[in-house]
């Protein structure tokens, strides 16, 4: 799997392989595996948590990686099969400085609900239309600033 990601703060693309990340493997029994043989579960999912700073803006980021293990005799190959952003809880959307603060605040609130709302993207689109019209009428704002 590609380990290319975008910074949730500034949006630059980078590779998890190219950052100085700290990795830990969560233990579900609470004991080190040498002392608890039940920790190893051949059918259970394996995870690692990667924490690092963005190479551009230097803000803290944390990912949960699901690990796939393939056995070749005595050798084990481990690969990241999926990655989920843990911190910050959701990417921060950059807003043009031309946008008035009261409208930018509404947009940030609507954007934050995108990740926690059961209606997900539908809510943001419903809020967007009136917000976009307000932005167009109050400043020289274009949809390209919104993206």
Image (cartoon, helix red, strand yellow):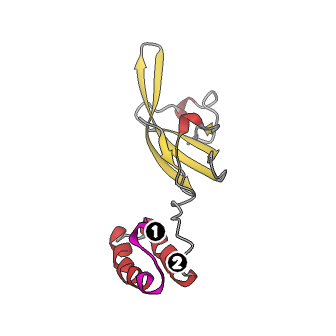
Q: Mark 1 points at which residue?
A: 145
* Residue drawn at 37 percent across, 68 percent down: 120
Q: Mark 2 points at which residue?
A: 99
Q: Is residue 139 magenta?
A: yes
- Which residue in the rendered view is the most extreme toward the front? 140
Give the prevailing secondary structure in the magenta stretch: helix
- SS assignment at label 1: helix
Q: In which quarter of the image is residue 116?
A: bottom left
Cα distance, mark 1 to mark 2?
A: 9 Å
Q: Does the magenta stretch include residue 96?
A: no
* Residue drawn at 58 percent across, 37 percent down: 25
- Which residue in the rendered view is the most extreme toward the top? 73
Percent x, y of residue 58: 67, 50
- Whether pointer 1 and pointer 2 mark residues with C-beta atoms closer than 8 Å, the reply is yes
Q: In this view, does 142 lie above or below 42?
A: below
* Residue drawn at 58 percent across, 42 percent down: 50
Q: Give the range drawn in magenta.
A: 135-147
Percent x, y of residue 47: 51, 39
Q: In which quarter of the image is residue 16?
A: top right
Q: How crowded is mark 2: few (under 14 residues within 10 Å), some or many (20 or more)?
A: some
Q: Is residue 87 above or below residue 30?
A: below
Percent x, y of residue 63: 54, 47
Q: Which of 99 and 139 is in front in this view?
A: 139
- SS assignment at label 2: loop
Q: In this view, does 57 lie above or below 4?
A: below
Q: Quadrant of residue 10?
A: bottom right
Percent x, y of residue 67: 46, 35
- Which residue in the rendered view is the most extreme toward the right? 58
Q: Quadrant of the N terminus?
A: top left
* Residue drawn at 45 percent across, 30 percent down: 79
Q: How crowded is mark 1: few (under 14 residues within 10 Å), some or many (20 or more)?
A: few
Q: Quadrant of the C terminus?
A: bottom left
């Amino acid at each position: 799997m590609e380990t290319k990601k975008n910074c949730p703060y500034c949006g630059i693309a980078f590779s998890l392989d190219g950052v100085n990340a700290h990795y830990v493997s969560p233990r579900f029994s609470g004991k080190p595996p040498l002392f608890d043989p039940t920790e190893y579960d051949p059918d259970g999912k394996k995870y690692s948590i990667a924490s690092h700073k963005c190479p551009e803006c230097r803000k803290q980021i944390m990912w949960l990686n699901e690990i796939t293990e393939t056995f070749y005799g005595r050798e084990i190959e481990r690969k990241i099969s999926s990655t989920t952003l843990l911190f910050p809880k959701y990417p921060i959307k950059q807003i043009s400085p031309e946008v008035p603060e009261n409208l930018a605040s509404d947009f940030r609130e609507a954007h934050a609900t995108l990740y926690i709302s059961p209606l997900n993207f539908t809510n943001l689109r419903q809020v967007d239309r009136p917000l976009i019209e307000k932005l167009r009428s109050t400043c020289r704002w274009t949809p390209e600033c919104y993206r």
